Image (cartoon, grey):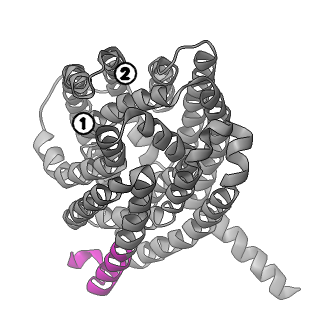
Amino acid sequence: MKDFKVVIDVVKQKFSSQFIRNLSWLSGSEVIIRIFRLVTTVTLSHFLTAYDYGLAAVVLTTNEFVQVFTRFGIGTKLIQVEEERLQELSIAAYWLNWLIYLGLFIIQCVAAFLIAWSYRDNRLILPICAISLVYLIVPIAYVQSILVQRENNLRITAITNVLQVSLDNVLTALFAFLGFGMWAIVLPKILVAPIWVIIYYKSHPWRPTQGFSTKHWGEILRFGRSVLGVELLRTLRNNLDYLIVGWFISIEELGIYYFAFNAGLGISLSFINAINSALFPHLCAVRSNWEKFHQRYLSSFKTISLVIIPVVLLQSSLAPIYVPLVFGQKWVAAIPVLIIICLSAISRPFADAASQMLIAIDKSDLDLISSFIFTIVFAIGLLIGVHWGVLGVAISVLLTHAVFQSIFTLWATRYVFKRFNGFETI
């Protein structure tokens, strides 16, 4: 009986940690979001054609490539910086964000014409330009959103995600039912963007206390170079398969692949994103205490194993049953691709944890080099796999992720914890 009480106390202590609480909030929000997304995906599968899916994939991929330039390490810097310098860097980040987002709005609108010409379909121009309107409001509450993360108040993040994404999915299903085609996927993302801004703006008291200034921009940009490089390469990898399938096979085959990717990997990526959002501030909070840092990092692996692996294996094994029942017989051809893509999720969160560990100890340059090598390996694999159609592309995704990310995770962990005894030596 005494031993049982000891076990209970250990469990309580484990689940009382800030990381677990944050992960619980974020995971809970992702479960709710996935329920809405499931209903939406079912609706889309019945009312959209594969070609509609392909067009939407091009629009969202273009937006994702442009959007990556918003991840210039500004948020990472604000989470990591010492408390006494937080206010001055927050002001610098606020004005720098306005410059970046306004510039990206213009760039995406210009890119819309080039993308439409590349795919020989002028229907792509208007949606690509329309979705860039979101850039004109995000800077209003960007700093507040980062400060919420810095303070580990990820309950706000979870609530915001649920409201924004759930409404997005409800509108998507409604517009698909009404026959909006690819606009059913694009238009809701524009309409729900103000929700994100309003919630974060009201959830944190920070406001800019001085006018336009370029002070500290150089420091932020120097810090963010490697972070941006990693994000660019990650975004390229996340979308390179879409580009290759669309260019070398067809828009319709891209639609099938895009459906399989979202129906198969969507659930796993939701949990992976929740883990990533909770882990980085969790590590940065103890970056001056090597022992606790080490403990938190290794503990995250246990959490990842308990959350991700069962979800991936269950979903992939049940795919032949639920795809025809839920989505319809016309998507049966996507089942093998869905299973393979789903399995590629197993190695991703472990590599992401290793990546965030390197950034937390100011070793983002090593993360950038590793990401660059992985991107080259991934691109070569895709170009080989495309000769066997979308199934060959899916197999390439699985093999390159499983092999390279496993090697990277083991190397990064061994490198950091064998080489350094504390942050004062870095």
Report the predominant secondary structure element of the magenta stretch: helix
Does the residue at mark 1 contact the one at mark 2 (Cβ under 8 Å)? no
Residue 424 at x, y percent in the picture: 24, 76
Give the answer, above or below, for where 106 lies relative to 275.
above
Element on which disc 2 rests: helix
The one of 386 and 210 positioned closer to us in this rendering: 386
Give the answer, above or below, for where 78 lies relative to 162.
below
Q: Which residue is depicted at the point 66% across and 47% down?
A: 28
**Start and end of the magenta stretch?**
407-426
Task: Name the N-terminal-most of marks 1 and 2.
Answer: 1
- Do we see residue 289 in this rendering? no
Q: Residues within 10 Å of mark 1 (few under 14, many from 20)?
A: many
Front: mark 1 or 2: 2
Q: Which residue is depicted at the point 76% across and 80% down?
A: 7
Residue 363 at x, y percent in the picture: 23, 66
Q: Residues within 10 Å of mark 2 (few under 14, many from 20)?
A: many
Q: Amino acid at mark 1?
A: Ala
Q: Which mark is residue 93?
A: 1
Q: Which mark is residue 223?
A: none
Give the answer, above or below, for where 167 lies relative to 361.
above
* Left or right of residue 110, residue 297 in this image: right
Residue 49 at x, y percent in the picture: 53, 26
Quadrant of the image containing the C terminus: bottom left
